[in-house]
Structures are given as structure tokens and as C-alpha cells.
Amino acid sequence: MSDTRSSPVLATLARVLGQDELLTDAADCWAYGYDNSRRQGRPIGVALPANADQAAAVVAACYESGTPLTVRGRGTGTAGAAVPADGSIVLSTERMDRILRIDAPNRVAVVQPGVTNAALQRAAGEAGFFWPPDPTSAEYCTIGGNLGCNSAGPRAVKYGTPRENTLGLTVVTGTGSVIRTGCYTTKGVVGYDLTRLLIGAEGTLAIVLEATLKLTPLPEAVTTLRAVYADMESAARAVSRVMGQPATPRVLEFMDGKAASLAQAHRPGILPPRAGSVLLMEADGTRATVGESAAAIARAAHGEGLIEMRTAADDDEAKQLWEARKALSPALRGVAPGKINEDVVVPVAAMGRFIATLDDLGQQHDVNIVCFGHAGNGNIHVNLLGDTAQPAERERMEACLGDVFSTVLALDGTLSGEHGIGLVKRDYVGLELSPQAMELMRGIKAVFDPAGILNPGKGLPAVT
């Protein structure tokens, strides 16, 4: 282990935490320097607090010494929000992993930030509830990370994102001060809504110590449907019809034609021939009503271009209908491990036009683009396939990405739905936000974090 006496902040943290809660060896710290963006930073220490008091003391020590500090869950994010600056401290929440309360009568869970999404779902499920956000990485990602990026997953189309499912937070600001935001009830308008401000801020304003979450009763029944269309335009029109009628699906996912072809190549026979787009839908509710909801969704999904409509008769058939979507991720990793993956959002009615434009941009830049995602709220995962390790290829992909972002904004969309900004999208933020809006946000940052130590360099572009 490195000698903590060589760094004042490490010496302070050693006193605050103890040697078992502080990593300083370079090899140990290296493992905390990257996330799923594949970017790497070099922290000088990793703090492993077990409770809120210790976490607040870590922030206070970094504030007093002016040392940059990045909070980290399990590193599943793809935008580089958990990548620390060189010479900084990482605060890992992995030991703050207690579910403090499941309050079924009030539909509330109180958790520490290091609790995984899956652990919360299991605990809530035992009481007959669930927390609606369900990212694909649920088995590994933490509640703190979900809150940091406002990560939602497929169920957001009906049940909302973490912002709609969080009642209050206990956080530590950049000065080491602990504050409470929000309330324990589902109604409350005292003061400004700091809870929603902090969710999605990627740890740049404060670090979550405890979260009070709104639970939802588990449905009695779920019915799965799959619709296959001849082209993306037909599927996009179907999405608008489905979202325009009262029976809101709890899941409405899509794959474009290229994604369908990749899934077919990975698992032959899982889709009908000529599949130009696929919609995967789920209806939920009581046993008495779910059939009616599923039928209404199916009727809305019928229309020009429909090749096949299937409704699962049981859980086994439901798994079969989901096979194509589950085959897509390994197929993409196989053909393009160096791909660029973005999660833009466009209005639902503009999805068909957006995908058609992507086809044109792909031809223009000689980049293969594959799309899938959460059709019900227009959250599209745009995958630019290629090898970013090859300079010429990366240059084409990045030029294409800039045009993709310009198209998104021209359609009244936004540059990120749930992956966050981090390092990866930071330099594009000025395309969406005005200089005046960014100046106001920097002012908010200065109030919460006057020394600028919390996750520096993330979220907003540098002032030039």
C-alpha cells in the first residue's frame, strides 16, 4: 500500500475511515478508474465508506484540501460519468448497500445508494411491490447510479423514470454539508424541488447518501405481444396508434430492420422472413383486465405493413417472443465491439422520419447504423458500428454522430434519455442548451459545490 503520509488528503481519509476503508495501491485504484464507456482515469485513492457519516467526512476532507472527488456505483454507465480525473479520490458506494426500510402501507422504500436495482426489486417484490426503473443492467447497477443518470429502462413508458419515482433524498453537498430534499409523502410543495434537480446530475452537485423511493404494486398478470412489420415507417405509425389509446403498455420496445437481421443471423428462425422492424409490447394489470388491455394494444398495432402479430399464451411463449431482442446485444458485440452507442430521444411521431434520416446519414458517412430501444417514449439507442480504434474509421463515425445529434435536435428531441452526459456527450451539450441556460446551471453548480470538487469536467462543456 502507498504511504498515505505523502498526501494530506489521503492521511486525513486514513484517519476518518481507517485503512480497511481506503485503497491507495495503484493496482487497487486502477479498477475504480473506468466505467462501461471504456475510458480510464487514475485516482490516487478509493474511499469505501460504510455509512452516511463516513461518506460526508470524505467529502469534507476533499473540500478542505481542494481534491477532486467522483462518486461511483458499479461502473455500468456508458457515458464516462464515473471516470475520475487523474489525481482524484473515488468514493465508492459499494459498502453502503443496505435496504433500510420497506414500508408497504405507505408504498415506500428507503435505501442506501449502493443497493443494486435487482436487490431492491427482490425485497420490494416480497412485499408485493416493485420500483419502476428497470435498466438492462439491473442485476449490477446501483440505485445511486440510477438516480445519477435518471436511468429508467423499458417500464418508463408507463411508470416513469427515477425522477417520477423518488420522493426524497439525503445528500452531501460539495462542502460536506448534509441536507434532506423532498419528503416522505407523494404530495409536497415546500421549497424548491431539489430532488428532481439532483437526479440526473451525475454526482456533480451532491452525493446521494439515502433515497426515499416510491413503490408500485406488482401487477397480477402480464401479457406479452410481438408485432413484426415490413418496414420501420409502418412500425412507427403503429407506435403512435398504440400510444394514442387508453391502454398504455408497460413496455413498448422496437428493433429496426438492421437490428432484426443481426438477431436473425445470431439466432436463425427467431423472426419471420422480411422482418423490417419489430415491436415488443407488454400489457399488465389484474387478471380480469389484462386480456382486454392486451387486445386493445393489439388492435392499435394492426395496420399497413404488419407481417405478423403474436400474443404469448404463457410465460414460456413470452420468453420465445423476447428471444430476438435478447439476441441483439451479443450479436452487436460480435460484429462491432468498438461501436458507438447513443441513446437519443425524439417525439414518438417523428421516429419513422428519424430512422429514415439515419439510413441516409449512414450511406453518406459510410457507417452502418443499427437502432433499437424504447419506442413508447421515443428513446432510441443509435449504434454506429465500426472500430473506433482505427483513426480514419473513428473520424467517420464521429462526423456521422454529429449529424445524428443535429437531426435529433431539429426534430425537437434531446441528446440523452437515460445514459447521461458524462465525458462522452459533454462537448455536444451546447448544441441543445443555450449559453444563458448553461451559465445558470454553472451558477447552480457553484452553490452546491463552490470548490468545484464534485465530478469535475462532467455534464457541461468547459468555459472557453
Image: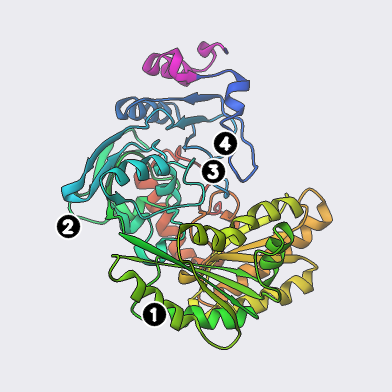
Query: Would you identify the image quadrant in which residue 6 lies?
Result: top right
Q: Residues at badges 3 and 2 in contact (C-beta under 8 Å)?
A: no
Element marked by disc 3: loop
Disc 4 residue type (three-letter): Ala
Marker disc for residue 76:
3
- The one of 20 and 447 positioned closer to us in this rendering: 20
Q: Quadrant of residue 80?
A: top right
Residue 416 is tagged as: none
Q: Earlier in the sequence, mark 3 or mark 4?
A: 3
Picture coordinates of residue 340, whole percent (x, y): 67, 56
* Pointers 1 and 2 in contact (C-beta within 8 Å): no
Dot 4: element: loop
Which labelled disc corresponds to residue 85? 4
Q: Which residue is mark 1?
A: 296
Mark 4 vs mark 2, foreground winner is: 2
Q: In the image, what residue type sits under mark 2? A: Gly
334 relative to 151 in the view: left or right:
right
Q: Earlier in the sequence, mark 1 or mark 2?
A: 2
Q: Are marks 1 and 3 in contact (CB under 8 Å)?
A: no
The CA span between labels 1 and 2 is 36 Å
Q: Which residues are magenta?
A: 2-22
User: Which one is earlier in the sequence, the residue at label 4 or at label 1?
Assistant: 4
The span from disc 3 to disc 4 (Cα, nearest Å) is 18 Å
Q: Earlier in the sequence, mark 1 or mark 3?
A: 3
**Viewer-nearest of discs 1 and 2:** 1
Locate the N terminus and report the quarter of the image it occupies: top right
Report crowding for label 1: few under 14, some 14 to 19, many 20 or more residues within 10 A (C-alpha): some
Q: Are marks 4 and 2 in contact (CB under 8 Å)?
A: no
